Amino acid sequence: MEQEELRLRKGGAVTVPVAGSAAAYVDTFRRRYDPHVDLIGPHITLAFAAELDACDWMSARSRIQAALADMPPFDVQVAAVDAFPDSLVLWLKPDDPEGQFATLRNCIMDMFPEVEFDHAGNFVAHISIGFFETEEQLEAARTVVARELVPFTFHVAYLSFLQADEGNVWRCVDTVELGTGRVHACPAQDSDEEER
């Protein structure tokens, strides 16, 4: 897909989408606490770089496909809430005892050795659900979410490459499946599709 077709801004993110019923559940929290809920779906950001765009992604796509073909899909349980107090961000914590998200992140970053990724040496797999103005607001929301959170599982079957359009809505540009390396059309932005 040509970047100009969608009028996308420079800067790209490689994400693990939270799909299906898990996405709908996560969005029940995001609708309360995340002003960006309509700009991007629930996800785990593996890597973001201000200089990465669709042309860069497409030129590395065959290498990404080959690498991801050797990484099987997996299920992730989410049962805890946490926060980044310095940036006043509330997030759900995926259980990742085998370090699969870090493995995926390193794989992606290795595909773009010339790209300077944000937070290159500091990665915490997380699903952002809220952004706050004060620490008091953050802690109040954390208490509510901790009380209401019902553990859930979602299936990680593919990675998505996203770019923001001129309205700052993040659009899926491409997806690559784990375990096969196949590429396919991005899921519909507003669908409530079940996990693949």
Image (cartoon, rainbow, N blue to C red):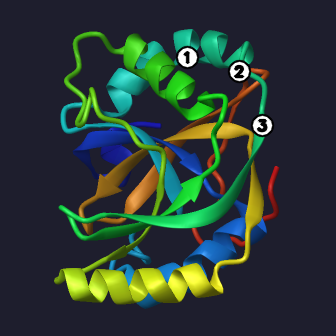
Q: What kind of element bears circle 2?
A: loop
Numbered label attached to residue 81: none
* Left or right of 14 in this view: 12: left
Q: Is there any visible trace of residue 41 in the rendered image?
A: no
Give the left or right position of residue 42, taking residue 46 as reference. right
Q: Which residue is mark 1?
A: 64
Residues at marks 2 and 1 touching, judged by CB atoms closer than 8 Å: yes
Coordinates of residue 157 in the picture (x, y in percent): 74, 39
Query: Whole-Å distance between the Cαs marked 1 and 3?
Result: 18 Å
Q: x and y percent of residue 162 in the render?
A: 43, 46
Q: Position of residue 140 (x, y in %)?
A: 37, 89
Tag 3 secondary structure: strand
Residue 21 figure quarter: bottom right
Tell me the amino acid under the disc marked 3. Phe
- Observer-side mark, 2 or 3, equals 3
Mark 2 or mark 1, earlier in chain: 1
Q: Residue at x 54, y 57 (%)?
A: 93
Q: Position of residue 172 (x, y in %)?
A: 50, 50
Disc 2 target residue: 181
Q: What separation in Å lies between label 2 and label 3 (alpha carbons)?
A: 14 Å
Q: Which residue is mark 3?
A: 74
Kindly identify the residue that appears in the image at 57 percent across and 12 percent down.
Answer: 62
**Kind of residue at badge 1:** Ile
Residue at 38% of width from left, 20% of height from top? 109
Mark nearest the camera among 1 and 3 is 3
Residue count near mark 2 (Cα–Cα under 10 Å), binned few <14, some 14–19, many ≥20: many
Binning the other alpha carbons within 10 Å of mark 3 as few (below 14), some (14 to 19) or many (20 upward) gives few
Separation (CA) of disc 2 from disc 1: 8 Å
> Which amino acid, mark 2?
Gly
